[in-house]
């Protein structure tokens, strides 16, 4: 493959973000063909050059792959599960690249999940600082009061830490209503814990959107590759400038 700037190469290989890779270079922790490199403009070819970070060999990154999957219920968002439960990786028939899930959806939840082998892309999607909203449709065993809704939107203390401001809108009024919830962060079981704070239990939870990308008509267990246009749009949103 052609030569690339070291910081970009390390980011694509999943070693770190590009900014962190620049720091590694400046700190003298990167070697190319046995020589320490401290110049940020240095280029290398991972197919031809011997690159190490902190003494560990960095191999050529695979071709970037970006997948959108409709994670079904009762499926783990992990590469493997010690309890033998099904994982999202078992759904990726025909995908040879070593992709991994971006973020998580809990075992009982379903919906849109991204998978990739692009380490920098994954880190930026998950970082709250990039402000990529995640949108969920949630069925609850009872409606929140107006004051509870306002507190939900402003943020509440869950497990000792206040949640970031969130979007909340009732989209189907019923004894067991449906809400649309919009988060900028993704703490473990966050939506379930937020409703539980107000004495409500989540009966169904489905993620329908990540940023601009919608789940659409993708069926549970099915996946598709992101289009070139979607990848470019995500890279723009995530400020992953080509260098």
Image (spheres, rainbow, N blue to C red):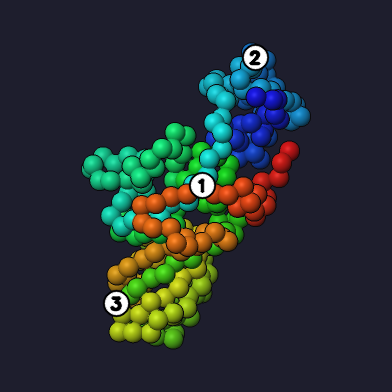
Left or right of residue 81: residue 113: right
Whole-angstrom CA distance, mark 3 to mark 1, is 36 Å
Q: Would you say 221 lies left or right of 3 here?
A: left
Q: What element carries label 2?
A: loop
Measuring from the top left, give residue 65's x and y in whole percent: 53, 40
Task: Give neighbour class at mark 1: few <14, some 14-19, many 20+ (Cα, 10 Å).
Answer: some
Q: Mark 3 points at which residue?
A: 141
Q: Which residue is drawn at 76% across and 29% down?
A: 41
Helix, strand or loop status at disc 1: strand
The residue furthest left is 83
- Mark 2 burial class by Cα count in 10 Å: few <14, some 14-19, many 20+: few
Residue at 36% x, 52% y is 221
Whether residue 105 is visible to the viewer of this picture, yes or no, is no
Q: Nearer the viewer, residue 235 or 42?
A: 235
Q: Which image quarter holds the N terminus? A: top right
Left or right side of 78 for 44: right
Q: Do the residues labelled 3 and 1 touch (CB within 8 Å)?
A: no
Residue in the image at 29% along x and 70% along y = 203
Residue carrying label 2: 33
> How far across and down, in percent of the image, does residue 51 sit?
61, 20
Q: Can residue 209 be seen in this view?
A: yes
Work out whether mark 3 precedes mark 1 in sequence or the reverse, and give the earlier one.
Answer: 3
**Mark number for residue 225?**
1
The quarter in which the C terminus is drawn is: top right
Q: Are marks 1 and 2 in contact (CB under 8 Å)?
A: no
């Amino acid at each position: 493959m052609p030569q690339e700037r070291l910081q970009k190469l390390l980011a694509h290989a999943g070693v770190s973000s590009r900014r962190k890779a620049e720091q590694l270079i400046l700190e003298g922790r990167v070697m190319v063909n046995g020589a320490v490199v401290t110049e940020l403009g240095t280029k290398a070819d991972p197919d031809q050059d011997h690159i190490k970070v902190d003494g560990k060999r960095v191999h050529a990154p695979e071709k970037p792959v970006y997948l959108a999957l409709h994670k079904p219920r009762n499926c783990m968002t992990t590469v493997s599960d010690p309890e033998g439960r099904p994982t999202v990786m078992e759904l990726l028939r025909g995908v040879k690249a070593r992709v991994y899930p971006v973020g998580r959806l809990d075992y009982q939840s379903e919906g849109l999940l991204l998978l990739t082998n692009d380490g920098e892309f994954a880190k930026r999607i998950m970082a709250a600082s990039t402000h990529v909203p995640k949108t969920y449709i949630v069925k609850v065993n009872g409606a929140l009061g107006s004051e509870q809704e306002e507190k939900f939107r402003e943020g509440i203390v869950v497990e000792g830490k206040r949640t970031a401001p969130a979007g909340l809108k009732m989209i189907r009024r019923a004894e067991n209503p449906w809400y649309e919830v919009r988060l900028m962060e993704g703490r473990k079981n966050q939506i379930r814990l937020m409703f539980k704070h107000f004495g409500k239990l989540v009966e169904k939870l489905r993620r329908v959107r990540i940023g601009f990308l919608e789940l659409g008509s993708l069926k549970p267990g099915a996946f598709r590759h992101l289009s070139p246009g979607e990848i470019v749009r995500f890279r723009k949103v995530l400020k992953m400038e080509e260098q």
